[in-house]
Amino acid sequence: TKHLVWLRNDLRLEDNPALYLASQQGDIRVVITATPEQWIAHNESPAKTGLRAAFITTLGHALAAQGIPLDILEVDTFQSVAPALEKFCLAEGVRHIWFNQDIPPHELQRDNSVKQTLQSHDIQVNKLASDLFVPQDVLSQQGTPFKVFTPFFKRWSMLLSSQEHSPYPAPSKQAEALNFSWSPPSWVRSAAPSFREDLWPADYDIIRQRLWHFCHTKEEHYDNDRNYPIKPATSTLSPYLALGALGPRQCLEAIHYVCEQNDRLWQESIWLKELAWRDFYRQLMGHFSFLAKHRPFKAETDKIQWRDNQAEFEAWCEGRTGFPIVDAAMRQLNQTGWMHNRLRMISASFFTKLLFADWRKGEAYFMSKLIDGEFAANNGGWQWSASTGCDAAPYFRVFNPTRQSETYDKDGDFIRRFVPELEPLEAKAIHNPSSEQRARCAYPEPIIDYKPARAQAIDAFSALNK
Ligand code: FAD
């Protein structure tokens, strides 16, 4: 076979430009380069690696059913990818390689090295855009990147309205079904399953059902309900989007369909806006590669002396800060690999503003646990919360965890689910129990005092502007 498709963060058959366009040229084979040491170096969580391995299996079987062989080249880091692909292509007589663009700088470096190596053997390299846009597509009238979301979104939706974005079909059957066998190697084997298969099965039919069910029944109420962690009101598709098991055009197709059915303008869908946030952070990463080097968007914020108390850090990680909503959030993350968006904001704001801890430490902890860990979105979310990012929360906006809890978990049901020791408390008490109630429930006292902690953070930020 002369055409090789190299899959990376796009582990799907449908809506996969590289896979589809290559298959239009003739018979194809597919390769995945597994780089377990690189994933560890990138702080990828065991949950995400586990889900990735599960999708490699699912994808291998799905491709085999179409008569398309899948090879897995196991190497260590990104640096070993180019020589491994070179060896494979030369041995198999590959003349064309196809892959979809990745955005973070380290991935770009890997791809450039593959491109150079293969081109030196006259192998044609076809790099495609699998996102809705590449960073260079959505620019201001001056041709510069947007640093503020609202104008970015305006331009993004205008471009979206004027272009065709139907998902690419899956490649058609090219031969009799093959046998696919791949026993997960050591980097995915562990005593306990590394991810919650019950919550995120590696199954394309289930993803499709979840997407369409969400769009048919919940998308319309998303704006009202999305902030309440107890409600199953968001799509929970993020782990699939992060691994590319689901593509953005597939999401767009479902939004288009349901909005048309309900006589609504799809451009006004609030859920669509979240997909735009995803693209916003990705384009920032594409334009400002220093973001991948642990640097804040606002350079002056690097002068801040974070307090960085180790005992407080550990209490936060383990969900025993004495702030019930923060603890419930962190326990949700630790137990499921996922956290509701409102809670990610509460927890990150608590970390950066009240514990006054370096956002990079919080970012890294999230990454090490999240099943949907995405460098751009996670970095964007943390820099937003820490007020170090572009278009971030203003520094004087410090979430009051107790007020947030009263507003978004009014009855305390979410807290009760993840902090069972507080179960006996009534809604009125559960957001900030008295000392006596804490002692009775064996629940810790708050590790910080909200008011002075808030004042300290605001002072430190305002000193930067003097
Ligand atoms: P829905 O509400 O159904 O949204 C649909 C999709 O849009 C999501 O699956 C996601 O792909 C995208 N999306 C939604 N909100 C955002 C956002 N604010 N920024 C970027 N994309 C968004 N999202 C990740 O995918 N990976 C991360 O590592 C990540 N880290 C975060 C860290 C912090 C501190 C914060 C505040 C947010 C982070 N987010 C991250 C964004 C958001 O919290 C999750 O995407 C969302 O909770 C996933 O749940 P869902 O699939 O039900 O989302």
Image (cartoon, grey):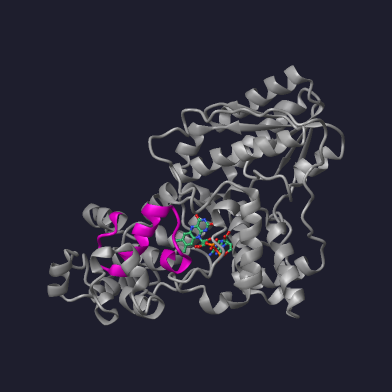
**Residue 312 or 72: which is nearer the viewer?**
72
At 61% across and 47% down in the image, what residue appears?
A: 203
The answer to whether residue 218 is left or right of residue 21 is left
The magenta stretch is 318-344
Residue 357: which quarter of the image?
bottom left
Percent coordinates x, y for residue 394 in the rendering = 45, 73
**Residue 258 or 431: which is nearer the viewer?**
258
Q: Quadrant of the C terminus?
A: bottom left
Residue 139 seen:
no
The answer to whether residue 161 is left or right of residue 59 is right
Q: Is residue 343 magenta?
A: yes
Above or below, comparing residue 247 to residue 66 in the picture: below
Residue 339: which quarter of the image?
bottom left
Above or below, comparing residue 67 to residue 402 in the picture: above
**Residue 84 or 460: which is nearer the viewer?**
84
The answer to whether residue 64 is left or right of residue 424 is right
Q: Is residue 135 magenta?
A: no
Percent coordinates x, y for residue 309 in the rendering = 24, 55
Q: In terms of secondary structure, what is the magenta stretch mainly?
A: helix
**Residue 327 or 292: which is nearer the viewer?**
327
At 21% across and 65% down in the image, what residue appears?
A: 447
Percent coordinates x, y for residue 276 in the rendering = 64, 65
